[in-house]
Image (cartoon, grey):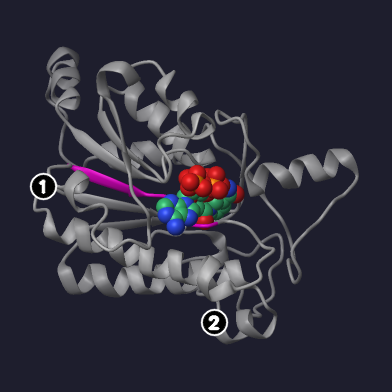
Amino acid sequence: MQFIIPINQYKTPLWSIHCSTNKPVTLTSETQKLKQKMKTVCVTGGSGFIASWVVKFLLQKGYTVKASVRNPGDPKKVEHLLALDGAKERLHLFKANLLEEGSFDAEITGCDGVFHMASPFFHNVADPQAELIDPAVNGTLNVLRSCAKSPSVKRVVLTSSIAAVAFNGKPRTADTVIDESWWSLPDLCRQNRMWYVLSKTLAEEEAWKFAKEKGIDLVTINPFMVIGPLLQPTLNTSATYILNYISGMFFTPKNTQSTCYEDVRI
Ligand SMILES: NC(=O)c1ccc[n+]([C@@H]2O[C@H](COP(=O)([O-])OP(=O)(O)OC[C@H]3O[C@@H](n4cnc5c(N)ncnc54)[C@H](OP(=O)(O)O)[C@@H]3O)[C@@H](O)[C@H]2O)c1
């Protein structure tokens, strides 16, 4: 099943999807805490804007977190993570690149769940295939292949995007609800040179195909622009939009009919 969060109504915190259950909760808070402490989850692209918040919330909830970073030696990418409450005891950073086949295998093995959040998010590219599409699509498959190899992984949460579903030429008004039937059209993306949009569309499509084939319990999340306080010391793309409003250099991607903002903390 594909979960599309209707724009303007995105209320479910990312981290609670992993924690949610249909079964009645009969554990005392003490045993519940102990049980959660024993759970280990992997977050790919841990130093990114949204992923840093997910790592923070997972640590707060007692999870052991294995977070991938491309360059563990870069203080700008890791210091804010290492300073989080619980990081000393329960955060393990590991080096992995989306384009390196098998580089997530060892760390995903034994995890209960995986949040796949690593994906290039920018618009100015010289080589869209190499800079955006390959890491998004092949990287997602790379991570899912690692998940398929590890029987301990019960669920994979993929941070897809509104980009994957909303760009198909259908009119979007204030009353439009973008649901599971919506997909962005790759040809339209190519025609309009919306390379990031194309990368997210193809990545989510491939993710669903692979997950169905391998029986992976996949949840996709399709947020619009995510904003909020930055934990990392550098600006990501969605925060740059806000800075551009403030500095007067407003920029909005071509063919955007509307823009919504969601708070990373809720
Ligand atoms: N922010 C939004 O408004 C928004 C909205 C909808 C969906 N999303 C999706 O949510 C996810 C996170 O977005 P964000 O805004 O938090 O982005 P971000 O801050 O730019 O983080 C992206 C992360 O992906 C990692 N990454 C990129 N290429 C990689 C590669 N080849 N190998 C390994 N890691 C790689 C980056 O690693 P480095 O730190 O080493 O560069 C970074 O940790 C993305 O999948 C994005 O498409 C974001």
Query: What range of the chain is rendered magenta?
Result: 112-120
Q: Is residue 19 left or right of residue 148?
A: right
Cα distance between the residues tagged 1 and 2: 34 Å
Q: Nearer the viewer, residue 42 or 131?
A: 131
Question: x%, y% of residue 101?
Answer: 27, 63
Crowd band around label 2 with a 10 angstrom C-alpha radius: few (<14), some (14–19), many (20+): many
What secondary structure is marked by label 1?
A: loop
The mark nearer the N terminus, 1 or 2, is: 1
Tag 1: residue type?
Answer: Ser
Residue at screen point 19% across, 26% down: 36
Q: Is residue 12 above or below residue 149?
A: above
Viewer-side residue, 32 vs 230: 230
Packing grade of label 1 (10 A; few <14, some 14-19, many >=20) is some
Q: Residue at x 51, y 71 (%)?
A: 130
Residue 110 is labelled as none
- Please tell me whether residue 14 is drawn above or below residue 98 in the rendered image: above
The residue identified by callout 2 is: 186
Name which residue type carries label 2: Pro
Quarter of the image holding residue 254? bottom right
Q: In the rendered image of this protein, does residue 65 appear above or below residue 116?
A: above
Q: Residue at x 19, y 18 (%)?
A: 33
Q: Farthest left residue?
A: 151
- Residue 115 highlighted magenta (yes or no): yes
Tell me the tag on residue 152: 1
Where is residue 181? Give x, y as percent: 46, 74
